[in-house]
Image (tube, grey):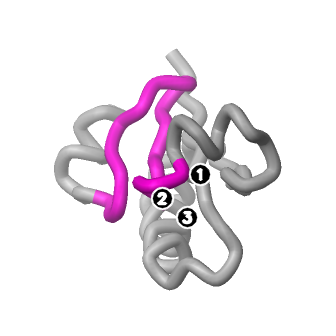
């Protein structure tokens, strides 16, 4: 099954920049497509994820937030 990763981010969020860099490095290595979405662009996302950005979603399901736990992230994509 092909996975897709989304990083829910926010402008001016230094943790988001770090998480995006980690996701980009790992996903590029594994050949997994990924993208970002601005949590503040949608009121529902803001309500659901606003206090926890960055939030990492794998196939639409919340995988984790605040940072990428690399070993756990790699296992989820294996």
Q: Earlier in the sequence, mark 2 or mark 3?
A: 3
Residue 36: x and y in percent read 69, 54
Q: What secondary structure is found at the residue carrying circle 3?
A: helix
Asked if 11 appears above or below 75 in the picture, the reply is below
Q: Residues within 10 Å of mark 3 (few under 14, many from 20)?
A: some
Q: Is 69 on the left-hand or right-hand side of 4?
A: left
Highlighted magenta segment, given as a residue range? 50-68
Residue 54: x and y in percent read 48, 59
Q: What is the spatial separation of the Cα atoms under label 1 and label 3, in whole angstroms?
A: 13 Å
**Residue positioned 65% across, 39% down in the render:** 45
Q: Earlier in the sequence, mark 1 or mark 3?
A: 1
Q: What is the spatial separation of the Cα atoms under label 2 and label 1, in whole angstroms?
A: 6 Å
**Residue positioned 78% across, 41% down in the render:** 42
Residue 37: x and y in percent read 72, 51
Circle 3 sits on which residue?
A: 24
Q: Is 37 on the left-hand or right-hand side of 24?
A: right
């Amino acid at each position: 099954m092909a996975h897709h990763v989304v990083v829910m981010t926010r402008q001016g969020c230094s943790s988001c920049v770090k998480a995006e860099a980690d996701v980009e490095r790992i996903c590029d290595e594994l050949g997994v497509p990924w993208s970002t979405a601005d949590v503040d662009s949608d009121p529902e996302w803001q309500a659901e994820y606003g206090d926890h950005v960055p939030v990492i979603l794998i196939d639409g399901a919340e995988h984790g937030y605040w940072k990428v736990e690399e070993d756990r992230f790699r296992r989820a994509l294996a």
